[in-house]
Image (cartoon, coloured by chain):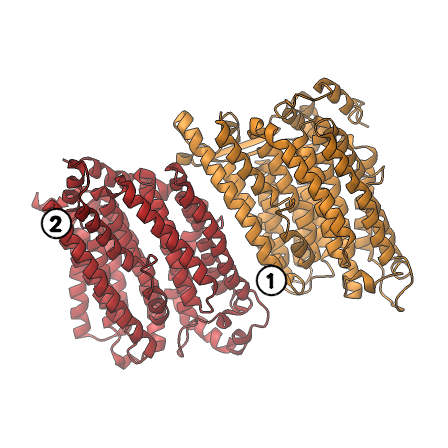
Amino acid sequence: MVLWLLILIPLLAAPLAWIGQQWSRHAARWIAIGALAIDLCLALLLWRQDRSAQTSGHGSWLFESQTSWIPHWGISLHLGLDGLSLVLILLTAFLGLVAIVASWTEIHRRVGFFHCNILLALGGVIGVFLAIDLFLFFFFWEVMLVPMYLLISVWGHANRRYASFKFFLFTQAGSLLLLVAIITLAFLHQQATGKPSFDYADLMGLTLNKGMAWWLMLAFFVGFVVKLPVPPFHTWLPDTYTEAPTGASIILAGLLAKTGAYGLLRFTVPMFPDAISDFAPIAMGLGAMGILYGAVLACAQTDIKRLVAYSSLSHMGFILLGAFSGTELALQGAVMQLVAHGLSTGALFMLVGALYERFETRDMRQMGGLWGVIPRGASMALFFACASLGLPGLGNFIGEFLVLFGSYAAQPMVTILASIGMVMAAIYSLGMMQRTFFGRQRETRLAPDLSNVAFGTLLLIAVLQVWFGLYPRSVLSTTRPVMETLVQPALPSPNLTHPPSELMQSSNLFTPNVSTP
Amino acid sequence: MILQDFIALAPILDLGAFCIITMLAIAFRRHHATIAVFAFMSCLLTLAALPWAATATPRTVTALLIVDEYALLYMGLVLSATMVVIGLSYRYLKIHFSEQEGIEEYYLLLLLATFGGLVLTVSAHFVSFFLGLELLGLSLCSLIGYLRTRHHPLEAAVKYLLLSISASAFLLFGMALLYFESGSMTFRGVGMVMKQVQTVPGLWLGGVVLVFVGVALKLGLAPFHMWIPDVYQGAPAPITAYIATVSKGALVALLLRFVTDVGALELPSLVHLFGLLAVVSMVTGNVLALFQQNVKRLLAYSSIAHVGYLLVALLAGGAVAAEAVTFYVIVYCAMTLGAFGVVTVYSREGGDAERFEDYRGLFWARPWLAAMLALSLLSLAGIPVTAGFIGKFYAIAAGVGAGLWWLVLALIGNSVIGLHYYLRLIVTLFDEAPARAVILQGQAVQATQAAGWTTVFSLGLAASIILLLGVYPEPLMELIRDSVSNLLMVAVQRP
């Protein structure tokens, strides 16, 4: 029931926010903030509770809720919460709040409808993280699409129409492929047991023949990777991220991309262990390609929002790399990267949005020397640029380092290539700082610095980044039981130099069993 | 024995009687509202007779008709859709006609066409099939041309007439061939021949294909779709909705029964041929819809594509296919009525609102109407929470279950193409610069008031069905499963 509350609070608050527009200008914003704050508190409460259960549990659901929906097809309203989904739900509620704060001064038209859509999209995202019936999962997977599309096409920048179309068509194509794979699995279950089922646990236990497993795995892979995205499925990303309003960009990069990663970790990797062990090198290669491709293109951008978009593409490559490496270290790193990248990209998009609001350009050639104009914004930008390039002591570093460290055992060459991406990250991140905030000021400009609320939000994100950088255990210990279950099937790479146990031990470096503070 | 026959036939007899009564009523009292209510009540009372008839099913009444739960289900669909169309028509006719022009026969023709549709759902014999089809077709022909002072409706009516004639020609020739081979005019008799012989005679195959072509012409399956866009565009909006729902629903009911009874899907050659037609239809409909600037034409092309999706489900064969087809048809009727309903409501004296321009910024001017249209379009595109998604899910499931991989992949690819033009219309609804909406806002308010409860009822019904089936489809699935099993059971019990 608690799980349903998590989903229903934003969904029910959505129409309320729309209506609230009539009462006062800010009513919609406050309703949205209230709903997400309640969600955040609820999730935090669950997190506090989960600590005790966590030590004994082995990746099984901490909370579960099941109601019959379409029994003939074996479809039920089945929600389950484990460490991975819990962490991502916390991230969702938090980034939702950030998105609302970021659009506080940006969105003036149709405020109520904007927040209605934000809440609907977030409700869908939370549903995706909770659903463990594949039909229900797909249901939520699509629910978040339409409001997202509206957010881009109504409140976006100049080229919004094209961008929103591209976004919707690409993701929909991936989704439909996914749908066919899901239905096929249900039918295979029917062939095996006489009854179709869409339940996660039922489908996990299915034995597939090799060819079928390959095709299904591929469909599951493509369906999720389109959302992530990774080349060659990425072409919607720069347009969409750039044209979307700030709030929507934060949700797109911070959360929607994470649903793709979540899908890979939750479904693709554990469901088709045999096919994955063959496919992992290709997937990891794609990940490395994504890292380098995103980084190279980010270096070449003059549009600051596009730069952040491509850097996001580059960081997503690490997640793919980690997800398929099959070692606990890298998998944990991928999760850390999910959280840290969500925070740092959210902050960067917020800053870019603030710049655009003040100077009405995203072109870095027309910026320069802005440190003197908006010192607060500039200092925050420096912080998050450093986070994005992987400065030790911040969350992103932990994520990327763990991924690289963990994947080296499986694919040394790919990992070496991928690590070049971290160097490139330094180039484009610092280049962005240089061109935007340092150097000679083009003309004398006066603009208000960041408002207290925005600055406070960014500071909060910065504190979280430092927290995760110095004490990653708070996230890693929550997700560890889930990740351990993923290690087993994906490890049978014969030329592995380290035995699994050794890797497990090394992971304890980062998750020491000290008592909680 | 005889009484049971009458009970089984109650809905058809009921509606037939009401047709006559309505005709007499028009002779006595020419009053628009009265006759409209009369027509509406006729459908409602016929609908009420369905449960009663269900007590006597399944029952073969003479060689011509077979009343089973499957037929009753489709009757319910046809009658409900007619009721919605009547609800939509009332205001539309008021705007387009003055009271003296004699608009009452419109409802009579509507009832007659529905009567034809009912006959189609129960026919198990070529004679009843042909009679039902002609009754439906001829009534529709005059309905399409009902706005007789306008150019477009007349053109559309002539086109529909030509189409009807050619469809009849194909059908009659096909029937003749089948009769020649089997010596029987009943569907099952025709099917028996195929069961008994080793190699299926060529003339028999040709006959089945010709009958299929006749039905395909009426359904608007590519490459027999040429008339669809013109007629959809030219016909008055409520009649377009009628063609797209009632006429198609009844024909699909017939097609499913024909294909099942004849056993056409047991022949791989026919499955391949129909599969090819399905792909052609999906591609043609979707690709041509991409370029449309006219909402009615866009919906027309999309309907061609949807018949293709339907055929994919049909070709899967067996119980799942019949369920999927039936579910899809019901869903398709709801969403098409929703879309054309909005076109109807938004239409003005000058003509139907059919250009994209008319819909620019509609959402900000008339949110409910635009939300309704957006909901219908999303449903047509197959996005979850709407019934269209469950329908598409069912169709894909049927295809996957039967291993029709290529058809399923074609369906997916086409869904993506289809999404593009639906989105194009939806984004227009949300666009800025509500040119016409602002100018006509005064009128719009008037129109909203004039829209009245009939429209609200019709659109509300469509919207609630779309949402309800999208979220909780189980009861309908259950119902369909029961009725369809009947159809298949009868088919299996072939002597």
Circles 2 and 1: CB atoms closer than 8 Å = no
The residue at the point 64 percent across, 36 percent down is A283
* Placement of A204 over or under B24, stated as above or below: above
* Number of residues whose C-alpha sits closer than 10 Å to that of mark 1, classed few (under 14), some (14–19) or many (20 or more): many
Give the image location of residue A437, x and y in percent.
87, 57
Residue B179 is tagged as 2
Under mark 1, the amino acid is Arg
For the C terminus of chain B, the image quarter is: top left
Q: Is residue A34 visible?
A: no
Under mark 2, the amino acid is Tyr
Q: Is residue B266 visible?
A: yes
Chain B colour is red
The image quarter containing residue A350 is bottom right
In this picture, residue A448 sits left or right of residue B441: right
For the N terminus of chain B, the image quarter is: top left
Chain rendered orange: A
Residue closer to the observer: A464 or B151: B151
The residue at which mark 1 appears reads as A161
* Placement of B63 over or under A439, stated as above or below: above
Q: CA distance from mark 2 to mark 1?
A: 57 Å
* Number of residues whose C-alpha sits closer than 10 Å to that of mark 2, classed few (under 14), some (14–19) or many (20 or more): some
